[in-house]
Image: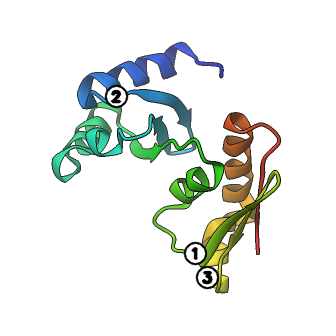
Amino acid sequence: MKLTLDSIRQITVFENVTKAMVKDCIEREDSLLFIVEEGNVQKALGKDNMNIRKLEHMLKRKIIVIGFQKDPSKFVRNLIYPIRVESIREEGKIITIKAGDTKTKGKIFGREKSNLKWMNELVGKYFKEYTVQVE
């Protein structure tokens, strides 16, 4: 994991405001994604999402918080939350998401499969040789 000076500053601000332990900080086009240690999501959000609103104001970007899980399929479920899917199953090193309808499938894929590529990148970063696919 390579951290820039800017992302270290953002992690420090996040941890000081929320008191939650950050595992990683990823910059996307218009938002900052913080992956927090297991069990720290509620602490990171704060009462009535107050911490997130405060951070969005301070960092002037949309903030997304994802809870890390040691189980790859549970981590994928956290990545796609709040999208509801029929099932997520793990077969060997492949995690398969059964979407159900085309609307849900489209949300998981994203425009030009950008969400799926991003998800595979993150899963591969923490769980070597794992890939995500959608049915």
Q: Amino acid at mark 1?
A: Val
Where in the figure is residue 1, as x and y percent of width and height? 65, 22
Identify which residue is drawn at 27% across, 27% down.
Answer: 19
Q: Is residue 91 shown above or below 33? A: below
SS type, badge 3: helix
Where in the figure is residue 115, as x and y percent of width and height?
A: 66, 57
Residue drawn at x 52%, y 13% is 5
Left or right of 54, for residue 89: right
Residue that mark 3 sits on: 103
The residue under label 2 is 14
Q: Classify 10 Å Cα crowding around label 2: few (below 14), some (14-19), many (20 and above).
A: many
Residue, disc 1: 85
Amino acid at dot 3: Lys
Judged left or right of residue 124, residue 35 is left
User: What is the x, y in percent for residue 106?
Assistant: 66, 74
Q: Quadrant of residue 15?
A: top left
Query: Quick one: SS at disc 1?
Result: loop
Sequence order check, earlier mark of 2 and 1: 2
Q: Calculate the distance from the C-alpha at mark 2 to the C-alpha at mark 1.
A: 30 Å
**Spatial distance from mark 2 to mark 3, Cα to Cα?**
34 Å
In this rendered view, identify the residue nearer to me: 69 or 3: 69
Give the residue drawn at x 42%, y 23%: 11
Q: Quadrant of the C terminus?
A: bottom right
Element type where label 2 sits in the image: helix
Question: What's the residue at 51%, 31% (across, down)?
Answer: 25
